[in-house]
Amino acid sequence: LVVSTILFQLNAQQNERLPLDPQIIKGKFENGLQYMIRENSRPENRMELRLIVDAGSLQEDEDQLGLAHFIEHMAFNGTKNFAKNELVDFLESIGLRFGPDLNAYTSFEETVYMLQVPLDDEVIIEKAFLVLQDWARGITFDQEELDKERGVILEELRLGKGAQKRIMDKQLPVLFHNSRYAKRLPIGDAEIIKNAPREVFLRYYNDWYRPDRMSIVAVGDFDKDNILSLIKKYFSGLENP
């Protein structure tokens, strides 16, 4: 609930009538990346982390339909500091189980990565921030892993077909007339998912995964000053393209 409240306040920060919870530490680095930190003692010995990227399917070019969501998948298929198996093994070792929307999601306007971290091991805490940093700027897009993941995305697309999808295909052009929302469902286009070359993925990633479009949220049973120092260590030095 606390994390949801912070995300709501982050999205509504331009509305000055909504006061910020005084227990939240909020700031921004010179590179534009924002952070919000809140100590919260329940549940004990746990921390929730979010990397929020202010980009989703609306930011896709015509040859990228579906790639914002695809890139979210690729975040779990190898990064600069974690090969695919190493990353999955680490996440499962700290209690995460994978499933729909459990560890990440992509919408029209944002992509959000989520971690729940136990706080009884400093090595695990630091490694969790390294994972977030890798998702922010270190996804490797290994060609073999990329090609393997195409089938996973296409199966998601297939499972989404049906009467409800056909109705939505008729409704969206009316509800969102002359808007990109009508043409940018995050699941994307099957032909692009099948055939998009690696450089098209990299173009989206380099264009939109940039610190001035990112926020870090940390909530948990921790010392706020220690968490702020870790956020500074792993994110203040990221550079914008």
Image (spheres, rainbow, N blue to C red):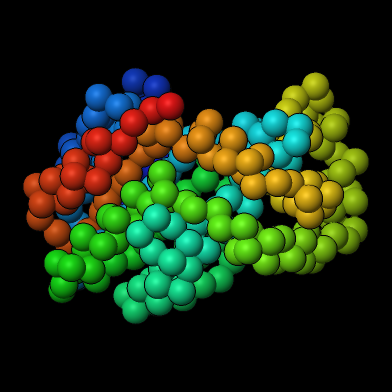
| Residue 7 position by quadrant | top left
87 displayed left or right of 65: left
Near-viewer residue (90 or 142): 142
User: Would you place residue 122 above or below residue 201 in this image?
Assistant: below
Q: From the top left corner, tell me how far across and down residue 198 is, in percent.
A: 64, 47
Q: Is residue 151 above or below residue 69?
A: below
Image quarter in which the C terminus is found: top left
Number of numbered discs present?
Answer: 0
Q: Position of residue 218 (x, y in %)?
A: 27, 51
In the image: residue 227, left or right of residue 53? left
Residue at image position (18%, 49%) is 230
Location of residue 80 (image quadrant): bottom left
Q: Position of residue 29 (x, y in %)?
A: 24, 29
Quadrant location, the N terminus? bottom left
Across and down, in percent, residue 66 comes to 70, 46
For the question of whether residue 156 can be seen, the reply is no
Viewer-side residue, 108 vs 154: 154
Give the residue displayed 85% in from the left and 56% down from the top: 164
The answer to whether residue 150 of the structure is visible from this angle is yes
The residue shown at (40%, 72%) is 86
Q: Is residue 4 above or below residue 109?
A: below
> What's the residue at 42%, 49% (across, down)?
138
Image position of 124 with respect to 187: above or below: below
